[in-house]
């Protein structure tokens, strides 16, 4: 015969245990869901060193395969629709494998990006690079060379063979002649020499030099490995 009183007592106990578990689970979830008071605010890096640290951290995520794809949603689009305030200028090559926003795991409104073949420079390109620091106070300019640059390779072959490239490609080769001579024709060295040359040229720019002297701007030269995804600083 079924002891109804025992069943009722067991049901009450089980129900109390279940309620306790549910209560603990809800409390635990609520605790995890609440943001920590120690969470740093999502603010724009305001100094050259902060900007470089942010780019380095983004590149670390890119190398490790832990990218977060920040500032790539509708809310960010709305946020920057009327005003932009990027924290860095990245001057890089046109190579399809070297996209600064991906390399540094950044998003909409984070970077001014200037791209030319072999990051060769002229007055028009300089003017484009000047805009951020001169008009908006952007604290960092990064000149980014990269492994196996096709433009530098073509220029090196052209200069070695004394054979003019077609169209305006010959202008690129002419721009890289000094780097070619000082690197002994070694393409990878040539890429690095040219990157350092562009940095030196930008540091002397009439709009950059005063800001650099006051510590409000830094111009950094770096090298991107297509094999590993890592960016290393040259100068």
Image (tube, rainbow, N blue to C red):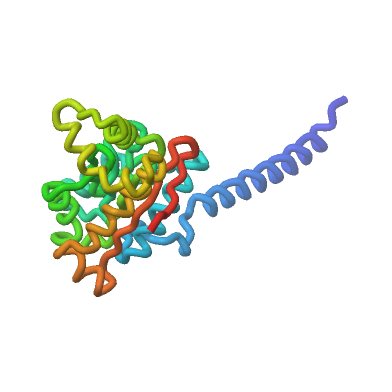
Q: Quadrant of residue 170?
A: top left
Residue 226 visible in this rendered orientation of the protein = yes
Work out which residue is located at the far bottom of the displayed protein and give it.
214
Q: Is residue 106 left or right of residue 21?
A: left
Residue 2 place in picture, x, y as percent = 84, 27
The quadrant of the picture occupied by the N terminus is: top right
Residue found 39% across the figure and 35% down from its top: 148
Residue 75 visible in this rendered orientation of the protein = no
Residue 104 place in picture, x, y as percent = 38, 46
- Looking at the rendered structure, the number of numbered marks drawn on it comes to 0
Q: Quadrant of residue 187?
A: top left
Residue 126 versus residue 112: which sits nearer the camera? Answer: 126
Residue 41 versus residue 14: which sits nearer the camera? Answer: 41
Q: Is residue 209 left or right of residue 27?
A: left
Residue found 36% across the figure and 44% down from its top: 190
Work out which residue is located at the far right of the displayed protein and give it.
1
Residue found 45% across the figure and 60% down from its top: 39
Residue found 34% across the figure and 59% down from its top: 51
Above or below, 158 against 233 in this view is: above
Residue 206 versus residue 29: which sits nearer the camera? Answer: 206
Residue 83 place in picture, x, y as percent = 16, 52
The quadrant of the picture occupied by the C terminus is: bottom left
Residue 8 place in picture, x, y as percent = 76, 37
């Amino acid at each position: 015969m079924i002891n109804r009183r025992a069943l009722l007592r067991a049901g009450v106990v089980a129900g109390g245990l279940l309620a306790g578990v549910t209560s603990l689970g809800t409390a635990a979830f609520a605790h995890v869901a609440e943001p920590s008071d120690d969470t740093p605010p999502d603010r724009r890096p305001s100094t050259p060193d902060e900007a470089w640290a942010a780019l380095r951290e983004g590149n670390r995520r890119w190398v490790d395969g832990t990218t977060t794809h920040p500032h790539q949603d509708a809310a960010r689009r709305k946020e920057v629709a009327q005003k932009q305030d990027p924290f860095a200028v990245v001057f890089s090559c046109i190579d399809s494998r070297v996209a600064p926003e991906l390399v540094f795991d950044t998003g909409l409104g984070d970077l001014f990006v200037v791209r030319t073949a072999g990051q060769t420079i002229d007055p028009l390109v300089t003017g484009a690079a000047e805009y951020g620091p001169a008009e908006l106070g952007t604290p960092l300019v990064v000149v980014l060379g990269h492994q196996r640059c096709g433009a530098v390779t073509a220029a090196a072959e052209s200069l070695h063979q004394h054979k003019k490239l077609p169209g305006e490609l010959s202008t690129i080769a002419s721009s890289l002649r000094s780097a070619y001579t000082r690197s002994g024709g070694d393409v990878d060295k040539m890429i690095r020499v040219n990157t350092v040359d562009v940095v030196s040229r930008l540091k002397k720019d009439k709009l950059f030099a005063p800001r650099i002297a006051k510590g409000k701007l830094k111009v950094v030269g770096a090298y991107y490995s297509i094999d590993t995804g890592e960016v290393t600083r040259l100068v």
